[in-house]
Amino acid sequence: MKKIDTTNWREFQIKELFYKLDLKCRKKTFHKATDVSLTKSDEFNLPLVNAKHSNNGIMYYGRSEDFEAEDMTIDIVEDGAASTGDVYPQPQSTGVLYNAYLIKLIEPVSSKYVLFFLSAIIERSVKQKFGYENKCTWDKVKEVNVLLPVTTDRKPNWAYMEQYMQNIEGKVNSDILSITTALDGPKSQIKVDTTTWRRFHLYDDELFIIDNGTKLDRVKMSENNPSINFVGRANANNGVTACVDKIDGIKPYDAGCLTISLGGEYLGSCFVQEKPFYTSQNVNVLIPKHPMSDYCKRFISTMIFREGRIHYKAFIDELNRHMRRDFSILLPVTASNTPDWEYMEKYMQMIEQKTKNALYYLAS
């Protein structure tokens, strides 16, 4: 898609366009254990915004009679280690739980696509300005400027926003269909047999040194001459949340090490780092004890993520206390019961080639 020409767009302060809703829980006594649910049902049918860094900002559902709600709003996450500054469109009726708030356009707009467009623009403007120690409150956000397309009379061009997002939706749907078709191919895939695989602790002689990481605070770091990746508890972009200045006296970890998130929403997220890096709190670094190909590292990182998501739970039973004790992963083994590096490498090469074929199919 060609680059958008924004030369005729205009800046607006967010408070010129939106007002903040003050939505409350109607219950005199609220108990989280009994008054909300992680899954939507006939009883718990109202989405509630909170500090959620995915799933459109929705983690819990409440009873519609228990919460004030509004439709055609935008959700801004006020607080959270990874979610501060996240912005989500909420076209459906939605309530507020905590650590987030809803804003609504002063000029009524009925198209959900306008909300999609505005949410992306607002997040681009606020996400990097706020963090865990500088919360994304309405008092601050309302003063932020956003650049928007305008009509000939210099008012927001809602029709342009709607058409643009409809075009994006159509392209994405087409791309997903093409990729799915290419990846499926002939129905001849065979499920991997893991019955002969063996469990290994990450600290075993064949695998890694487990390091605590640099435990730095992202909001306290400078970006005047950024050269070092900063890895946080995230599940996108290899866990890299910023590029920061190198700190005198703190040596970055080498490229090729693995990072693993010990807790939070993306518990178990594990990545092979491609460049030197620092880490945030609750991110361990896995340093290979022996030479190991990137294919093998990616195989292992996938098994770590799978194990973390299946057997551990964010905020309840996280990985902090398990990493050096009983956390283990399944790996294929040779006849001598050691990790089968050749199998891992060939398997990941096969996955890589299959993905390349899918992308080639999509581009052609």
Image: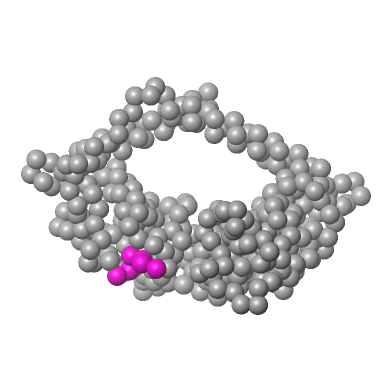
- In depth, the one of 167 and 3 nearer the eye is 167
Specify whether 199 is left or right of 95.
left
Vertical position of residue 252 compared to residue 93: above or below: below
Magenta stretch: dominant secondary structure: loop
Vertical position of residue 335 compared to residue 155: above or below: above
Specify whether 133 is left or right of 13.
left
Q: How many marks?
A: 0
* Residue 231 in view of the camera: no
Residue 152: x %, y % from top left = 90, 46
Q: Quadrant of residue 106?
A: bottom right
Residue 310: x %, y % from top left = 35, 54
320 is within the stretch colored magenta: yes
Q: Quadrant of residue 26?
A: bottom right
Question: Image point 19% across, 44% down: which residue?
Answer: 197
Residue lying furthest front: 43
Stretch in magenta: 316-321
Question: Image point 42% across, 64% down: which residue?
Answer: 314
77 is within the stretch colored magenta: no
Specify whether 269 is left or right of 242.
left
Residue lying furthest left: 336
